[in-house]
Amino acid sequence: MLKTLIAALIGMLALAVSPDIKGEQETQGEQGRGAPRQDEQWQRLQALRVYSIIDALELDATSERGLAILGMINRFAESHRRYVLRRSGIVAELFGEMRSVQPDEEGVARLVSELEEVELEHLAQRQEELAEMNRLLTPLERARLLVADEMFRRRLRDAMRRQGHGGSGGVPQGRHRPGPR
């Protein structure tokens, strides 16, 4: 248990000092996305996720192999985070354009092309990540990682629902819109 806690702290430290993450935070600031509080929340969630994965893999995070796996997990998470931020920014612009009375067809075409490019880049990146995961982990470890990650996501989704966040869109649970009278 103590080893796992230490490993999680090492993962958090690696996440906090990662040059990719700092560069992304600077980029977000320039684009007006990713407020500091959201960055802190993401880092806390990532630390919990890493902890659950370390525990599931029974990983010695102080070993060379353990550090390589932790690095891989953090790189994958940061890559996915950048994808989500880029995609949501483009989608927000696209929504804004489509809400106008007369959408600019060239602008919409540019945004759709950007969105498709981001999606293709993400797919290529995901294939590289899967190849790296296959190289570093045994089939049993890959299965444990996937199950631990899915369980973490379910727990997070359930916690959000308990806090009143709908999770699947619509009105958050416990907060009803007033109906017609």
Image: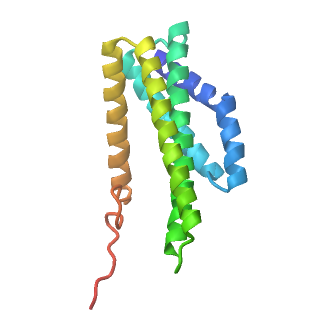
Q: Position of residue 108 (x, y in %)?
A: 54, 63
The residue most toward the top is 64
Taking the image as shown, residue 126 lies to the left or right of residue 106, namely: left
Taking the image as shown, residue 144 lies to the left or right of residue 29, namely: left
Work out which quarter of the rendered image holds the C terminus and state it.
Answer: bottom left
Q: In this view of the protein, can residue 82 be seen by the observer?
A: yes
Work out which quarter of the rendered image holds the N terminus and state it.
Answer: top left
Residue at 38% across / 17% down in the picture?
Answer: 57
Quarter of the image for residue 49 reads top left
> Which of the two residues, 175 or 122, is positioned nearer the viewer here?
122
Q: Position of residue 76 (x, y in %)?
A: 51, 30
Residue at 33% across / 34% down in the picture?
Answer: 150
The residue most toward the left is 181
Residue at 37% across / 31% down in the picture?
Answer: 149
Q: Position of residue 148 (x, y in %)?
A: 34, 28
Quarter of the image for residue 136 reads top left
Give the colour scheme shown.
rainbow
Q: Position of residue 79 (x, y in %)?
A: 54, 35
> Which of the two residues, 133 or 141, is positioned nearer the viewer here?
133
Up-down: is 17 above or below 179?
Answer: above
Up-down: is 50 above or below 101?
Answer: above
The residue most toward the front is 106
The residue most toward the bottom is 181
Up-down: is 138 above or below 128?
Answer: above
Up-down: is 98 above or below 148?
Answer: below
Q: In this view of the protein, can residue 1 be seen by the observer?
A: no
Q: How many marks?
A: 0
Residue at 48% across / 24% down in the picture?
Answer: 128
Taking the image as shown, residue 60 lies to the left or right of residue 106, namely: left
> Which of the two residues, 118 or 89, is positioned nearer the viewer here?
118
